[in-house]
Amino acid sequence: MSNVGRSFGAMNSKWREVYRKKEIKAEDVALRLIQPGQQIYIDSGVSEPQAIVKAMVEYAKAMIDVKIIQFLCLHDKQYFEESGGAQDVFRHNAFFIGADSLREAVKKGMADYTPVYLSDMPSLFRRRRVIIDTAIILVSPPDIHGNCSFGANVDIVKPIAECADVVIAEINPFVPRTHGDSFISIDKIDYFVYNDANDLLDFQYDAPDDVAKEIAKHISMLVEDESTLQMGIGTIPNAVLQYLGEKKHLGIHTEVFADGVVDLVEKGVITCEKKTLHPNKIVCSFTMGSKKLYDFIHDNPFVNFYPVDYVNDPFTIARNRKQIAINAALSVDFTGQINADSIGSMIYSGIGGQMDFMRGAAKSDGGKPIIALPSTYTTPTGEVKSRIVPSLAPFAGVTVTRGDVHYVVTEWGIAYLHGKSIRERVMNMIGIAHPDFREMLLEEAKKINYVFKDQELAVGKDGRVIPYPEKYERYFLCKDNSQLFFRPIKPTDERSMQELYYNLSDQDRFYRFFSPMKTFRRDKVKPLVYIDYKTTFILVGVTEETEVEKIVATGGYFLNPNINMAEIAFTVDDSFRNKGLTKIMLDYLVRIAQEQGIEGFFGTILMENKPMLHIIRSLPYKLEASVEESEFNFKFRFADRIEK
Ligand SMILES: CC(C)(COP(=O)(O)OP(=O)(O)OC[C@H]1O[C@@H](n2cnc3c(N)ncnc32)[C@H](O)[C@@H]1OP(=O)(O)O)[C@@H](O)C(=O)NCCC(=O)NCCS
């Protein structure tokens, strides 16, 4: 018995002797046990049984026509080496593609891909719709009860081991002993190979680039305290964790997690204390990471592993309150059809658990299903292309339908699509597309009548689409100690602005527009919504009511370039008045205007408009004012500040 690996309190130091009839050499698997034409399952992800796989490739010529099924293949090459002729022996069928060599093999038609929801995979085997002759699994040495742990991967391997005709285990003392529904009795193992020569495979996501960081920051804003998180496979979903350091009592219910979760547990951010399902436990089905992660999950009752038909069942997921599902995509059309598994006809990854968690999070009380992707990609020839497209590329797969999509996030912002019309979706998606592609998207949408024929985008003097100045987004504390989110206006605010104005009383309409305005048709609202933020700046204060923003306050300035002064105007919803919103907006607009080099503000108020008069008169600036009939005209320069 060797002393390497993790400590298990193994059943007794002589367990190999007790079960010596079951012990075989790795090459026996290839030379004796796998029969011609068999269909085998090989444990996947970081739990690939490395000694057995190596022997199978080495002794490939001794085998005939072996079908390999794997959930997630991370190990490169292996069965696809051009030399040695192994590809003539093995036909690989992946349920999710991780390794480049497998992607290449599928592309060339040398290997297969099966699109299936992660939650549905176990039932394929349990119902024997897919028969596994031999399951080759990786497990820990047996504990004092004779149970071996599946370690970092319970996923579909446990259900498969329960229905395969023959189970061959590679028993490796580096495999962490994980808790949950994650054990197999050594009595259920027909043969085992002992291997203490290597730890689990190491897996790291690429460091997030600036775009990924920006997307991650946006998503972090959607994560409330006490949320339960799922992060799908990908750099971006996992980068989000880096921006959650200030959150409180987060929980984890996810099919997979990586090292980033360990950091947040150590910081005390992930406590799982407020979870409504499995409180005080991280729930997962597999992990992929470094030794740090494997040490963390080893013999740690805080982390519970279950097969995917439990973890990924949307009904299970929905039992978590505030379940946030964060999943990456490759492209999305402007109506919200998500493609995450293919680049045209090339199968890139797989369906995985994306749809399971999108559905589960949508049904969770306070849950948020989120799809994240950069707005562009660069082709091998250096051409930059939009990932937000009028229609998905021919052959590309839809992994989330437009009926299921909720949040889509790029580095340009967040689009909320659920319950929105095609026209609203297109405009929202254009708003988070890269500015260089927005006009193209709008033109394409016009051609098929998805938007109004006269729909515009805010275009600057140089003819280019003006990017949304996100840096001005922020929360302010109101007089009643509530917080309200303020941001610059966007083209997609057209309808909300109409609603704000239509809700005004006749008197308020008079105060704001100096006439009894009856209509706020699109042509009236458009100049306020499609703006060049350099010369016109309009802020809106928004509340989020059932995930649909409502504008409750707006204030803005309109530059008169001849005098380098800007005219101001404000409107606040009746039920949000006297909370200090106009004063907040005015103060903020002064700061923004100063940044633009504007010298001061001016305006006109009806004398009977007491609140507005009061606001202007109590400003800390020297006021130039005159009264003409019932109108109060004022002007002030920012330089003439009176320190009170
Ligand atoms: C004018 C308007 C924008 C004010 O919005 P608001 O967010 O309620 O304003 P604030 O809460 O920031 O400030 C209101 C101030 O007026 C004061 N006020 C309210 N009613 C008043 C009255 N009848 N007489 C004098 N002062 C009054 C409040 O006490 C508060 O001042 P304080 O902070 O010093 O106590 C809002 O009433 C509105 O939308 N009216 C209709 C449109 C309009 O008139 N727009 C202005 C012309 S562009």
Image (cartoon, rainbow, N blue to C red):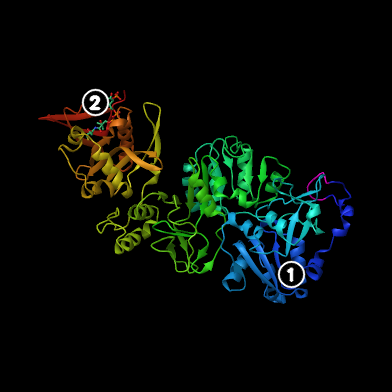
Q: Which residue is mark 1?
A: 57
In this figure, what is the number of numbered marks? 2
Disc marking residue 614: 2
Q: Is the shortest distance between ligand 1 and the CB of mark 1 under 8 Å?
A: no
Q: Residue at x 83, y 46 (%)?
A: 10
Q: Earlier in the sequence, mark 2 or mark 1?
A: 1
Which quadrant contains ligand 1?
A: top left
Q: CA distance from mark 2 to mark 1?
A: 83 Å
Whether label 2 lies within 8 Å of ligand 1 gets the answer yes
- Say which quadrant the C terminus sits in: top left
Residue 114 versus residue 57: which sits nearer the camera?
A: 114
Secondary structure type for disc 1: helix
Residue 409 magenta: no
Q: Which residues are magenta?
A: 4-10
Nearer the camera: disc 2 or disc 1: 1
Q: Is residue 229 visible?
A: yes
Amino acid type of the residue tagged 1 in the rendering = Val
Residue 577: x %, y % from top left? 30, 29
Is 208 situated left or right of 281 in this image?
Answer: left
Q: Answer left or right for 35 relative to 499.
A: right
The image quarter in which residue 157 lies = bottom right
| Vertical order, 184 against 54 (above or below) | above
Mark 2 residue crowding within 10 angstroms, few (<14) / some (14–19) / many (20+): few
The image shows residue 131 at horizontal and vertical percentages of 68, 64
Main SS of the magenta part reads: loop
Q: Residue furthest front?
A: 127
Query: x%, y% of residue 338?
Result: 46, 58
